[in-house]
Image (cartoon, grey):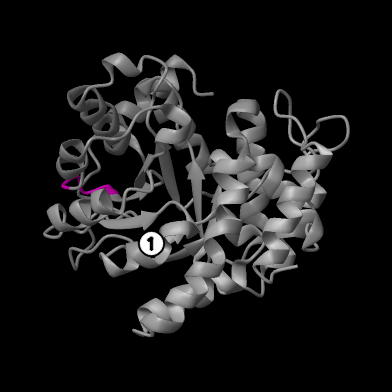
Amino acid sequence: MLGPRIWASVQQGLSRGLSRNVKGWASGEGRKVDIAGVYPPVTTPFTATAEVDYGKLEENLYKMGTIPFRGFVVQGSTGEFPFLTSRERLEVVSRVRQVIPKDKLLLAGSGCESTQATVEMTVSMAQVGADAAMVVTPCYFRGRMTSAALIHHYTKVADLSPIPVVLYSVPANTGLDLPVDAVVTLSQHPNIVGMKDSGGDVTRIGLIVHKTSKQDFQVLAGSAGFLMASYALGAVGGVCALANVLGAQVCQLERLCLTGQWEAAQKLQHRLIEPNSAVTRRFGIPGLKKTMDWFGYYGGPCRAPLQELSSAEEEALHMNFSSNGWL
């Protein structure tokens, strides 16, 4: 992590730089980086002794290389980032950057509980190759995470970040929804380019799209379960856990929506709803990793305290995918 002297240097140097043409910041054409598209939130593979398995990480990325993703999200919730050390978080981002093509965006989860720690992690992730930082809402003191507190937090992070910032709201894990009024205010910042909303409330997504329409601000759906609805309301893509196993199908849904083939999109969306729920809300990351094993990727174990599925849960998960024609 950055020491006090480096922190002071970062604060002094980057706070003067908002007019610079740096990736997501305002360019000569007045445009920000385009984050539209589908992203799998990459899982973190572990060995049987709970060490990060960088070899299996690279293998998974190579296998995903033929799927037309816009990029990859690393160190999101699916990546079990709260269970990794700071060194591991940075090493994972570095390894992913070395493997994926340069034209694929790398969105790295850099959120921490304090503003200073988040800035330090964001700067460090930029140094190891992240194209943009996806910053989850701090939530430990959620009772004091008012709109004013969150606006101050994200503004400071965006002021000091050398890469674009994407807001990240995931109330199922944090117990905190990033308020719409805060999103609207933050959308005006030149280094905040968009938001991943995982709450599943499509009326909220539509409202955010509407209220930020005058800004260069893009919204990504946080799940494949409501991807079609989000596209219909103006979202530009999705960060979808299900894309780790059904990546081609999630990208096909994207194409159908973008080309206005809504009837075909509806049929495909229907077949994705139950499997998506299974690898997110119902069985979570252990369910996703088990499914990855079935689809030719390496899922492997989770890091404690997450536990592997019971035999009954595994059977129910398998039935979920097979009944929808995926296994």
User: Residue 154 in the image: x percent, y percent?
Assistant: 28, 33
In the rendered structure, the answer to whether residue 73 lies left or right of residue 246 reads: left
The residue located at (40%, 29%) in the rendering is: 119
Main secondary structure type of the part rendered in magenta:
loop
Q: Nearer the viewer, residue 146 or 306?
A: 306
Q: Which residue is mark 1?
A: 35
The residue located at (47%, 58%) in the rendering is: 225
Determine the image quadrant of residue 140.
Answer: top left
The residue located at (37%, 56%) in the rendering is: 220
Q: Nearer the viewer, residue 99 or 10?
A: 99
Quadrant of the drawing holding the C terminus: bottom right
Q: Relative to 169, say whether 211 is above or below.
A: below
Q: Relative to 48, say whether 103 is above or below.
A: below
Quadrant of the drawing holding the N terminus: top right
Q: Relative to 288, say whether 225 is above or below.
A: below
In the rendered structure, the answer to whether residue 289 lies left or right of residue 137 reads: right
The residue located at (20%, 47%) in the rendering is: 187
Q: Can residue 291 be seen at all in this image of the molecule?
A: yes
Magenta stretch, residue numbers: 188-192
User: Residue 292 in the image: x percent, y percent?
Assistant: 74, 55
User: Residue 280 in the image: x percent, y percent?
Assistant: 57, 46
User: Residue 304 in the image: x percent, y percent?
Assistant: 73, 25
Determine the image quadrant of residue 31.
Answer: bottom left
Neighbourhood count class around disc 1 (C-alpha, 10 Å): few under 14, some 14–19, many 20 upward: many
In the rendered structure, the answer to whether residue 249 lies left or right of residue 180 reads: right
Q: Nearer the viewer, residue 209 or 76?
A: 209
Specify whether residue 51 is painted magenta. Answer: no
Q: Relative to 183, say whether 223 is above or below.
A: below
Amino acid on which the number 1 mark rests in the picture? Ile
Q: Can residue 40 be seen at all in this image of the molecule?
A: no
